[in-house]
Image: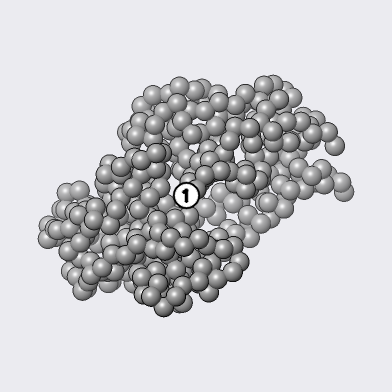
Amino acid sequence: MKWVNLGDITKIRTGRLNANAADQDGEYPFFTCSVDPLKIDQYSYDCECVLVAGNGDLNVKYYNGKFDAYQRVYIIESNNNEKYRVKYLYYFLKGYVQILRDNSIGGVIKYIRLGDLENARIPALSIDEQDKIIDILQQSEAIISKRKQQIEALSSLKQSLFLDMFGDPYSNNKQWSTGRIGELTSSTQYGSSKKADENIGEYPILRMSNITYEGNMDLSDLKYIDLNEKDKEKHLVYQDELLFNRTNSRELVGKTGVYNGDEPVAFAGYLIKLIPNEKANTRFISGYLNSVYGKKILFNMAKNSIGMSNINAKELRMIRIYTPPIELQNKYAETILEIDKKEKLLKKGLQQLNVLFNALSQKAFNGELFND
């Protein structure tokens, strides 16, 4: 099978805008390094392309139409769509992204180098073979998409439940008493700065990547550390305690989730653990910060520093919040736990579907898909 360099068959460029160029009322997609695009009121590009996040999550997307892009997003177009389909490039890069992750550079936030993209080796298949691969992977992707929609519906249900029970945080139409998050908090603690290991250590350690944008805990990729007795007091998180991502790209800083595991785990230095007092439930605070209103507050208050944004513990404690009765908060938390159980089952099924998709993709780009 013949192979070619991706850079020889494509045009690769990057976006030009900062993340703060987003406009939530905009007409066009604005692709940043997060999985979900933002909105913007202008566009600089009108093409069929593959979009590769150059830092942060390092995800891959396909798009055809008008859009704009963050300066760390790579925009990849085919030099000749009759020789190399853009969708073919997309499915190749979707599988190749793990190699890009392994080759990325940087400390906390990883960066993909242009050369790693240009030098990626891709099978030089015929158009007929490409179209067959596209058709098979599209069908598999459609099934995955339906499962994701079911999971997203549960996520939307959480948002609706929060608004139904507590009202709009912006208008406080239910006229709850208001204050600061610090007034609902007994303590805040930073996590461990100790270097984690892929396989060795007494405790799994939660990092910024283990908290999803929606506020869930993703435990599929864990590293491990050892802690002495003194550090255990400071750097372990227990069931129902809240973690807040204090440093990330601007659109991701402030990711908030509640740990629901049975056994304590460690948490990393770019997270803050928040323990509420008797006035608040962690799932209520998490729901507030993960609401559309809460996300907007976090985005606007995030400070930029060398490509990253930061919200420290003091600033977290100063965020304004309303305070419904604790009995209502607890009722909300009980319902959220039931939704989470259903979501967990759907995600297990999604994981199995992704394994199948990856197996099909690997066979396709190894020339094994049509051997039979």
In the picture provided, is 56 more to the left or to the right than 27? right
The foreground one among 372 and 264 is 264
131 sits left or right of 303 in the view: right
Quadrant position of residue 304 = top left
Q: Residue at x 36, y 70 (%)?
A: 234
Q: Quadrant of the N terminus?
A: top right
Could you tell me if residue 180 is visible in this image? yes
Q: Give the labeled residue for mark 1.
A: 108
**In the foreground, 27 or 363:** 363
| Residue sitting at x 68%, y 51% | 358
User: Which of 353 and 118 lies nearest the eye of the viewer?
Assistant: 118
**Res. 239 visible in picture:** no
Find numbered disc 1 in the image and state the secondary structure of the residue it sits on.
loop
Q: Residue at x 45, y 26 (%)?
A: 16
Q: Position of residue 255 (x, y in %)?
A: 38, 53
- Neighbour class for label 1 at 10 Å: few (<14), some, many (≥20)? few
Q: Position of residue 294 (x, y in %)?
A: 28, 50
Count of marks placed on residues: 1
Q: Which image quadrant for residue 119?
A: top right
Q: Is residue 135 above or below residue 172?
A: above
Q: Amino acid under label 1?
A: Val
Rendered location of residue 167, percent (x, y): 21, 56
352 over 86 or under it: above or below: below
